[in-house]
């Protein structure tokens, strides 16, 4: 019961303190709002770039050209051997006539050229289009396929794939670093802002100590006040995240530039980001208040 009374009194005193020290509270809330807004933008960018990287990786495939003299039995055997490999996700077989038809549909120039061929003039080869489970092992898988009998050429964009994977890894690591750095900056800025707020009220704390208030009675109102400030400072970033990202997703069509530039769907993404922002705001506010009272005012 005693702890409940202390908590209830702390909530009441913290609520009053926010309005009694309105200018300092506004400073703390503004600091939390700005840093959390930047953090929210960074998280959204990071996740969307990671999503684009995943789409690019999924689109990579190995194209296997079968030798022209291969029989149907040999082609079936090639398919069986490919499916036995560990890194295979899907295998799609196309005859050279089907390949020619797909080329005709993709481009008017190809259509004009291919329609000029006689039935026996098709120079294309039967092909297998293969999706792999792990893009990082695509080179190893391509070598294994190349060793299968009656397989001609094996192509997967060698050279370009390795370079792209290296770039994507660097980008992903950089974005993770930026998000973590912003979290640390948020903690630092908010802690220092709250520290100034508490330092300006040192006389109030000294009076509380003189009248015999325990450390817990002194700390609790400030910790709860930090919680309030964190929640209030999180409101604008959360609103901006929910409505801002929903508007961007609705009106900005990056797929017109490239099919890989697909934004993450708002639901439930924006709510997950908002929850993270709220948690960071409240934890940072409480930690900043607790740390400032304990360390700098020697309670």
Image (cartoon, grey):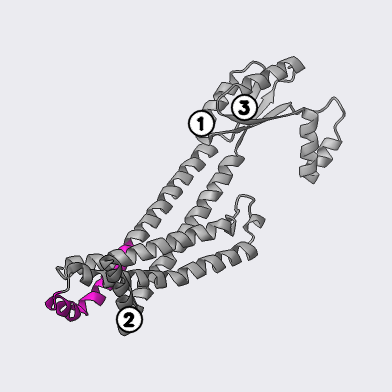
Q: Residues within 10 Å of mark 3 (few under 14, many from 20)?
A: many
Magenta stretch: dominant secondary structure:
helix
The residue at which mark 3 appears reads as 154
Front label number (1 vs 3): 1
Front label number (2 vs 3): 2
The residue under the point 51% across, 49% down is: 50
Quadrant where the N terminus sits is: bottom left
The residue under the point 74% across, 26% down is: 126
151 falls in the magenta region: no
Q: Residue 45: give x, y in percent of width and height.
A: 49, 58
Mark sitting on residue 16: 2
Label 3 element class: strand
Quarter of image, res 215: bottom left
The residue under the point 41% across, 66% down is: 36
Label 1 element class: helix
273 sits to left or right of 120: left
**Of 197 and 48, which appears nearest the observer?**
197
Label 2 element class: helix
Q: Which residues are magenta?
A: 185-212
Mark 1 vs 3, N-terminal side:
1
Mark sitting on residue 137: 1
Quarter of image, res 11: bottom left
The residue under the point 55% across, 25% down is: 86
Quadrant where the C terminus sits is: bottom left
Residue 281, relative to residue 261: is it above or below?
Answer: below
């Amino acid at each position: 019961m005693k702890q409940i009374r202390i908590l209830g009194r702390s909530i009441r005193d913290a609520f009053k303190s926010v309005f009694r020290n309105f200018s300092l509270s506004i400073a703390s809330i503004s600091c939390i709002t700005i840093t959390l807004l930047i953090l929210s933008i960074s998280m959204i960018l990071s996740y969307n770039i990671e999503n684009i990287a995943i789409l690019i990786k999924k689109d990579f495939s190995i194209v296997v050209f079968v030798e022209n003299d291969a029989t149907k039995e040999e082609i079936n055997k090639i398919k069986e051997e490919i499916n036995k490999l560990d890194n295979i996700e899907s295998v799609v077989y196309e005859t050279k006539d089907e390949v020619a038809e797909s080329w005709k549909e993709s481009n008017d120039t190809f259509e004009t050229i291919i329609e000029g061929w006689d039935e026996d003039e098709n120079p294309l080869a039967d092909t297998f289009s293969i999706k792999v489970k792990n893009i990082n092992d695509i080179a190893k898988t391509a070598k294994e396929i190349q060793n299968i009998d009656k397989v001609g050429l094996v192509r997967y964009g060698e050279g370009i794939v390795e370079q792209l994977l290296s770039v994507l890894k660097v980008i992903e690591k950089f974005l993770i670093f930026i998000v973590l750095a912003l979290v640390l900056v948020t903690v630092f800025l908010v802690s220092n802002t709250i520290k100034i707020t508490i330092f300006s009220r040192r006389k109030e704390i000294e009076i509380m100590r003189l009248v015999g208030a325990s450390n817990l009675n002194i700390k609790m109102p400030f910790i709860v006040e930090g919680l309030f400030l964190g929640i209030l400072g999180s409101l604008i970033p959360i609103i901006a995240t929910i409505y801002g990202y929903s508007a961007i997703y609705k009106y900005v069509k990056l797929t017109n530039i490239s099919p890989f530039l697909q934004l993450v769907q708002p639901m439930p993404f924006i709510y997950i980001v908002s929850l993270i922002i709220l948690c960071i705001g409240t934890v940072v506010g409480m930690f900043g208040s607790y740390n400032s009272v304990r360390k700098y005012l020697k309670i």
